[in-house]
Amino acid sequence: MHRRQFLAGLAATAAAAQAQQTRPNFIVIYTDDQGIGDLGCYFGRDMKTPHIDALAAGGIRFTDWHTNSPVCSPSRAAVLTGKYPQNAGVPHILTSKPDFNIPGLRKGENTIASELKKLGYRTAAVGKWHLGSAKGSRPMDQGFDEWFGFYSGWTDYYSHRYYTLGGTPLFHDMWRGEKEVFEEPVYQTELLGREAKAFLNRQNDGQPFFLYLAFGAPHYPMMAPRKYLDRFPAEMDRDRREHVAMVAAIDDQIGELMATLKARGFDRNTVIFYQADNGATREERADHLARSYRGGSNGPYRAYKGSLFEGGTRVPGLLRWPAKIKPNQVLGGVGMAMDILPTFVRWAGGTPPAGIDGTDLTPMVLEGKPSVHDAVFWDYDTMRAVRRGPWKLLRNYREGLGTPMVKELWLSNLDEDPGENKNFAASQPVLVKELTALMDAWKPEQ
Ligand SMILES: [Ca+2]
């Protein structure tokens, strides 16, 4: 081949690669039981999260961002399908069993992965799945080309075995595709970070990609290597120190992920969305002496994981895309996990599937418009809630998992009383009637 032909060929290849690269790559980072007080860029003044804080400063930090459910499985179902969890067939927490035959996401469900795959994206899931371990519900049945991680609600951070007290046996749970892999004693957060980086390093042909990276931390069992613990004062509360150390480990991995994106030239045109699956918990099994756990923080918000007060649902939410989103933005409009699918599919040049509940966030995040939502809803256990403007009506409420259910109406005004200390239900009968009607009109599948 003549040198000129060779150079022309190279230029054509580069142009083709560039054309493909006009479509962004996407990364969803999901963390587990991380409250809004468990990040430096929110209310976590004792945290050391420089990389996640930099991620926030590089784009949008949402201050009124919500998970669709105050617990693991339904929250994940919503972000991946763009639907309220009830409509995605996962209204409750899924159990974890060694037969790996727990049904979860329905076969044929549309997910961010399946939709982007149709548009020519390469897709990978790394980390905690918790959306069904039966065939049909697994990541590679739900649009992911590659899968590395575990199906259970949690695993031991070193042995990668699931366990719980009271009957269920210990079992190992770590997989690459259908193949079981043994990586003990690699610390789970570092293992998942390693796999995420490896995926990024395998992308070299201009095909756009989608990576779903779901860290198991800082969910119990609370375990952090010494090197992270040592970053925090020894006199710190024992549980808080472990908690912040586990988040510091995530932060290191995100730092390395960002460095990899930069080194590979993906940084500018990769959209990164970061969210926690639900607020911090008070469950006794997280505490090192089995007391009510105080290691996690929901900042100024009331209640914990498993509650529809803000502490259960208002979570860290970050969105970064250097090519299109201006840095250092703090947005106060309401957004929800289910909005990610339609937004990403649009930005990839596609049309979101019919029958989803989420809304494309483009007007809010690229055009300076207010929230894309009029009213949003939650339904969990026997609780239901509706939010419209500053008002939120709860029917039945509790403070967290395993705490007593109070069977009455509670009306919050989040502008006037963000801590939800005051019940406005008695003083606002007309509003209660209106919101009750909205809530009853919203009928998700069950
Ligand atoms: Ca969780």
Image (cartoon, helix red, strand yellow):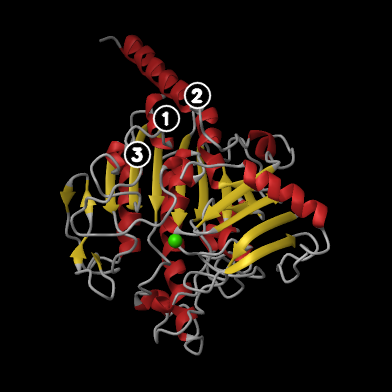
How many other residues sit within 10 Å of disc 1, few (<14), some (14-19) or many (≥20)? many
Residue 118 at x, y = what percent?
A: 38, 25
Q: Residue at x 37, y 76 (%)?
A: 227
Can residue 258 be seen in the rendering of this structure?
no
Answer with the quarter of the image where residue 291 lies.
bottom left
Q: Residue at x 34, y 60 (%)?
A: 153
Q: Left or right: 400 with respect to 196? A: right
Marked residue nearer the N-terminal end (3 or 2): 3
Judging depth in this view, the residue of 355 and 383 nearest the camera is 383
Residue 119 at x, y = what percent?
A: 41, 24
* Residue 106 tag number: 3
Can residue 357 be seen in the rendering of this structure?
yes
Q: Which residue is mark 2?
A: 350
Q: Left or right: 72 with respect to 103? A: right
Judging depth in this view, the residue of 35 and 97 nearest the camera is 97
Question: What's the residue type where badge 3 is placed?
Answer: Arg
- Foreground mark, 3 or 2, reads 3
Contact between marks 2 and 1 (CB within 8 A): the answer is yes
Marked residue nearer the N-terminal end (1 or 3): 3
Q: Residue at x 51, y 54 (%)?
A: 69
Q: What separation in Å lies between label 1 and label 3 (alpha carbons)?
A: 15 Å
Above or below for 210 versus 283: above
Above or below for 96 versus 387: below
Ligand 1 quadrant in view: bottom left
* Residue 115 tag number: 1
Question: What's the residue type where badge 2 is placed?
Answer: Gly
